[in-house]
Image (spheres, grey):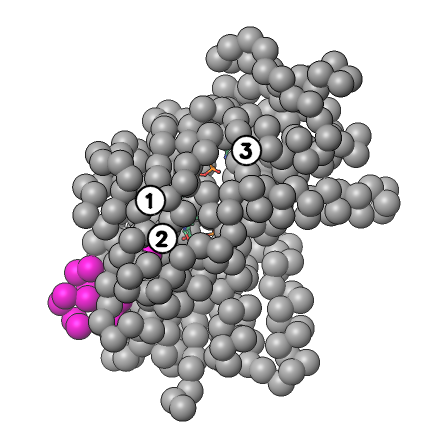
Amino acid sequence: MKDRVALITGITGQDGSYLAELLLKKDYDVHGIVRRNSQHNRSRIEEIRDRARQRGRVFELYYGDLCDSGSLNRIISLVKPTEVYNLAAQSHVRISFDQPEFTTDVTGTGVLRLLEAIRINKLEARFYQASTSELYGLAQEKPQTERTPFYPRSPYGIAKLYGFWIVKNYRESYDIHASNGILFNHESPRRGKNFVTRKITYSLACIKHDMQQTLFLGNLNTQRDWGFAGDYVEAIWRMLQLKEPDDFVIATGQMHTVRSFVEKAAALCDFDLAWEGCEQNEIGRDTKTGRILVKIDPRFYRPAEVDELRGDATKAREKLGWQPKVSFEELVSMMMESDLKLVEKQKQLL
Ligand code: NAP
Ligand code: F7E
């Protein structure tokens, strides 16, 4: 069998870590690009790397940045990957309003830099671009499919729109096997703590263990189609195994409010949550103790909100044979249980 050599940008992120694990299981050599940080931030991949090396497998990391073409060229020409997965991005929608120019550079122009490195090095690699349901933003159709018109609502969504189209353009112009995965929200115990699902499970675990007073949230009424990151990286890999490149929606087809995520997670902590008041004055109280668990902080509102997203992954089911395995309820339990254990451990170290 031909050597299977994967290069992953964003390997230190949630999806990067799950994808690296999956590809190692499938006997790939795995190479990843990491940014220089003032502190090591490889907690999601340290164990994976140690395990791979104990088994004599290739798992290499290189310093590079999507804002630095020279580093991308150097790494591409050195590694000569057969598959390139572009998962790196400034991926936080709210923060993209604070840093629109930086977000555009990394999340938008970064895609072009990587495609150029592939083109200039005449690399015959297959390319995956982490596109997003944020392209639909103010959704023009329900549910959203590969044919739904885009209407992004944030600097992040607009940067990803550029990424989507430059991938399509390089596919058509240079015959590169390049695919866009239009992934709806996907979560896990490895999700960053400033995304809403993990913020909820981690904060409730801290409240349960008396390490935090209150969970402060923004808009409780937005609705998302939340799946499990472990399921979604399988779809990502399947896209690059197709003979022809293509674009796919990856989603569960089910939508839930932020409010219902909080309610389910709170119940798993044995809180009896009841809502009182409205809008900015709304609170969530544990009726067993009278304690206020949830308050609204308008700082977490967005200048332009995406109110609801729900994907139709029929094409992925038919062409990739993919469907999600983990339900919404299982996802909330998995994350809540993991954070309860984590916080208990952290408390013991105090
Ligand atoms: P994440 O946890 O935020 O990870 C982002 C990764 O990108 C991290 O490894 C980060 O490195 C890296 N990165 C950021 N800026 C970079 C730069 N300038 N150069 C090189 N690397 C850089 O995101 P995720 O949830 O795993 O998502 C993976 C990708 O899918 C992202 O492109 C995201 O926009 C997209 N996406 C995510 C979802 C979702 O629901 N999770 C849905 C649709 C699309 P550090 O660790 O050093 O910060
Ligand atoms: O927000 C609301 C917030 O930040 C979800 C990224 O992975 O998925 C993610 O983007 C919803 C929004 O994810 C808080 O207003 C309420 O309506 O978890 P989030 P996101 O913005 O949907 C897409 C598909 C991506 O591509 C992105 O990379 O929750 N919300 N209160 C809050 N959100 C946050 N973060 N914090 C709050 O306190």
Residue lying farthest left?
173
Distance CA(mark 2)–CA(mark 3)? 20 Å
Give, as a single range, the part of the protein colored magenta.
Answer: 168-182
Query: Badge 3: how crowded within 10 Å, few (<14), some, or many (20+)?
Result: many
Q: Is mark 2 within 8 Å of ligand 1?
A: no
For the N terminus, which image quadrant? bottom left
Q: Residue at x 16, y 71 (%)?
A: 174
108 versus 34 height, above or below: above
Which residue carries the number 3 mark?
Answer: 261
Which residue carries the number 2 mark?
Answer: 250
74 inside magenta stretch: no
Tags 2 and 1 in contact by the CB under 8 Å rule?
A: yes
171 inside magenta stretch: yes
**Residue 319 appears in view:** yes
- Return the residue nearer the eye: 62 or 274: 274
Query: Badge 1: how crowded within 10 Å, few (<14), some, or many (20+)?
Result: many
Distance CA(mark 2)–CA(mark 1)? 7 Å
Looking at the image, how many numbered discs can be counted on the residues?
Answer: 3
* Residue 276 x/y as whole percent: 59, 11
Q: Residue at x 35, y 39 (%)?
A: 310
* Residue 139 x/y as whole percent: 26, 34
Q: Is mark 3 within 8 Å of ligand 2?
A: no
Horizontal side of residue 288 vs 282, given as left or right: right
Q: Secondary structure at mark 1?
A: loop
